[in-house]
Image (cartoon, rainbow, N blue to C red):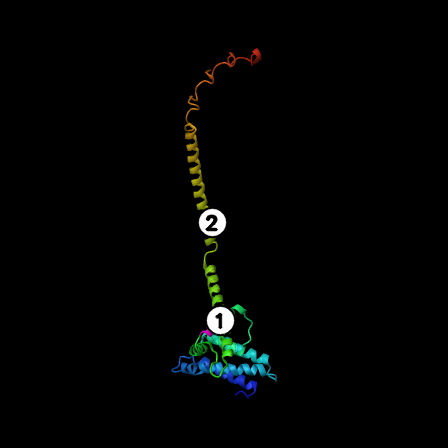
Amino acid sequence: AAEAPPLLIVARFYALSDVLHNSNAPVKNASAYRTHLQPKLPEVFEMLSDMHRSSGGRFSAEQIKSRVLKVLEAWRSWMLLSPRFVLGLETTFLPERTLEEKECDDAMESLKQLSSGDLKSLCAQSGIAFEGQEKANVLKKLVIVEVLSKRKEAEKLQHQIKNQRKEEPEGSDRKQRMDTSSLSKMVAENLRDVQTHKKNKLEQKKDGGTDSDSDIDGEPMDSDVDGEPLSSDIDGEPLSSDIDGDPLNE
């Protein structure tokens, strides 16, 4: 198959995709086709990757890439294979990715601690070929799958949170926060007024004073000032007298 023309290989790939799609049909034993084909897919994509890198004829590398990626998008929409498995197939086809160095280092540290058996099992789950492959290449592809899978999970979570916020009544959370803030402010102001009133009363008692409705210095408020009745004449003159001796009506 590796020596076949690229156009023929792509045609066979389309036929394989049709069989995979029909394996989901409600027909007895139809799923057996997917069970048989799925373990072979990583090897198929290794071959497609080699063809993509070496293509230079009538069927260009860009044409091959476009067709393969469109099939992978169709497989994602059919949901016949897990998202991680499809991501592994895509990584096998296009292994060169630009990723954050720290993300790759963290993933590599975790993968290096796995045994050969665990790595083989993880490759089977991730759409990565294991048999006959160099360990360094296997680890490189698994790192890409690990990093991109975590990114997709984070994006999915953010999308869910965003949708939940859209479903909430507009301004309800903000209004609730404002109502709570206003209530707290009012309670604080009332408490401050009560404390101020108590403090003033205590200071009045310390100074020997009484409540605001008591007499000043122990004298009744209706008493005369300096012993003189408030209704008395000013300087011996009655209040009803004329100013300067002249009658007010003249």
**Count of numbered circles on the image:** 2
Q: Which mark is residue 178?
A: 2
Kind of residue sitting beneath label 2: Met
Q: Which is in the foreground here, disc 2 or disc 1?
A: 1
**Residue nearer the viewer, 141 or 156:** 141
Q: Which mark is residue 77?
A: none
Main SS of the magenta segment?
helix
Q: Residue furthest left?
A: 28
Secondary element under disc 2, as helix, strand or loop, is helix
Q: Is residue 69 visible?
A: yes
The stretch drawn in magenta includes residue 75: no
Q: Which residue is mark 1?
A: 107
Category of crowding for the residue at label 2, using alpha-carbon neighbours closer than 10 angstroms: few (below 14), some (14–19), many (at least 20): few
Kind of residue sitting beneath label 1: Ala
Task: Give me the C-alpha separation between circle 2 and circle 1.
Answer: 45 Å
**Residue nearer the viewer, 7 or 114:** 114
Residue 75: x %, y % from top left = 48, 76
Q: Residue at 51% x, 83% y: name it.
A: 13
Q: Is residue 167 above or below residue 107?
A: above
Secondary element under disc 1, as helix, strand or loop, is helix
Highlighted range, magenta: 107-113
For the C terminus, the quadrant is top right
Q: Is residue 3 above or below residue 196?
A: below
Residue 208: x %, y % from top left = 42, 27
**Residue nearer the viewer, 71 or 38:** 38
Residue 219: x %, y % from top left = 42, 21
